[in-house]
Amino acid sequence: MLSQNMQSALNKQINEELFSAYVYLAMAAESENIGLPGFAHWFKMQYQEELAHADRFFTYILDRNGKVELDALAKPSVDEETPLSLFEKALSHEQHITQCIFKLKDLARQETDHATDVFLEWFVREQIEEEASTQTVIDQLRLVEGNPNGLYLIDRELSGRQPDAE
């Protein structure tokens, strides 16, 4: 059974993950607006991944006889962006989520909640991957800055992103 404190923190993380999905959906729309369907595809895949993360927390709380409590989502701030600024915002957001996961791990250890500590390990590994893949695109965008042909090639590459096997 989850402590009230842990249940509350996990519910907060559901909201963080749903907000992440909302942010990525807004980034997909902005990418479409600036004519980059491959970027839009990449962000849409990320949107779906974040929904799956929220669902993992949702299911875990229920499996531990907890109560799920959903909060309202804020409006994401995404407009008139460049491809590079979109990915820089994405990286910053992923770094925020990483810190949220670390705080949950700290709380699980403080409460000697071994089950939650183990559950969160998957998310620690996932955040390493999330930050690295986003940083890779940033690095590529910086390499081709000012080169529309390079941007076209990155857009084409991002359009081939497949769902992650979880």
Image: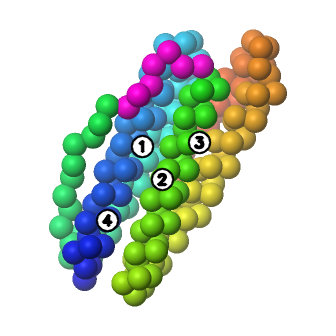
- Circle 2/circle 3 CB separation < 8 Å: no
In this rendering, position of residue 121 left or right of residue 21: right
Q: Which mark is residue 9?
A: 4
Q: Nearer the viewer, mark 1 or mark 4?
A: 4
Instruction: Mark 1 or mark 3: name the one nearer the start of the chain.
Output: 1
Give yes or no for residue 77 being in the magenta stretch.
Answer: yes
In the image, 22 versus 63, the foreground residue is 22
Instruction: Mark 1 or mark 4: name the one nearer the start of the chain.
Output: 4
Badge 4: residue crowd in 10 Å (few <14, some 14–19, many ≥20): some
Q: Which amino acid is tagged 1?
A: Ser
Instruction: Mark 2 or mark 3: name the one nearer the start of the chain.
Output: 3
Q: Residue at x 46, y 74 (%)?
A: 106
Q: Residue at x 51, y 43 (%)?
A: 93
Q: Quadrant of residue 128?
A: bottom right
Q: Residue at x 55, y 35 (%)?
A: 89
Q: Which mark is residue 91?
A: 3
Distance Cα–Cα, label 1 vs label 4: 16 Å
Q: For mark 2, what is the residue?
A: 97
Instruction: Mark 1 or mark 2: name the one nearer the start of the chain.
Output: 1
Q: Secondary structure at mark 3?
A: helix
